[in-house]
Amino acid sequence: MKRLLEETSDIVRYRGGFGHWTFLLHRLTGLGVLVFLLAHIVDTALLGWGPDVFNRVMAVYRHPFFRLSEVFLVASVLFHTLNGVRLIVVDFWPRATRHHRALVRGTWVLFVLLMIPVVIIMAHHYLEANPR
């Protein structure tokens, strides 16, 4: 048990730079997407109990908390995908490790650039669905 705690603390200990935060965020976004998929399987399975149960659960998802969570879900999928592509590039072309810092920065820049229109579109749809 002590060894497990030491190894876990070593994993999350800040080592500096984008690389470490990217490492942690890649794992967290993967877990977040997994949790979403499990919840999605469960709420879809609720159809077996009839449309009333299913519709009540779907009504809960219209709450602003879940609407905001959708933005984080899209961000998680996008970041996990872009970082996964970066990892594939490094795995298949070992010389790419020489450009590790540039690849990590490129991943972050691409993520931010792609998230800007996503947030605008999702906010627009939310505001259309909830006029004041």
Image (cartoon, helix red, strand yellow):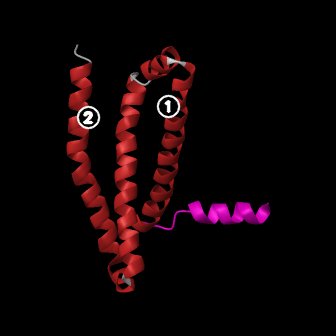
Report the residue marked by disc 1: 44
Few, some or many residues within 10 Å of mark 2 (<14, 14–19, 20+): some
In terms of depth relative to the viewer, which is nearer, 80 or 54? 54
Nearer the observer, 83 or 98: 83
How many numbered discs?
A: 2
Q: Is residue 9 above or below residue 130?
A: below
Residue at x-position 26% and y-position 34%: 122
Q: Look at the numbered disc 1 and give the secondary structure of its residue.
A: helix
Q: Which residue is mark 2?
A: 122
Amino acid at the residue labelled 2 = Met
- As measured in the structure, the alpha-carbon distance from the residue carrying label 1 to the one carrying label 2 is 23 Å
119 left or right of 72 in image:
left
Provide the residue span drawn in magenta: 1-16
Against 13, is 103 above or below? below
Position of the C terminus, as image quadrant, is top left
The stretch drawn in magenta includes residue 9 = yes
Residue drawn at x 39%, y 77% is: 90
Residue 76 x %, y %:
40, 49
Check residue 52 for magenta coloring: no
Q: Residue at x 25, y 20 (%)?
A: 129
Mark closer to the chain start, 1 or 2: 1
Task: Name the side, left or right, on which 69 lies relative to 31.
Answer: left
- What secondary structure predominates along the stretch shown in magenta? helix
**Residue 52 against residue 119 in the figure, above or below:** above
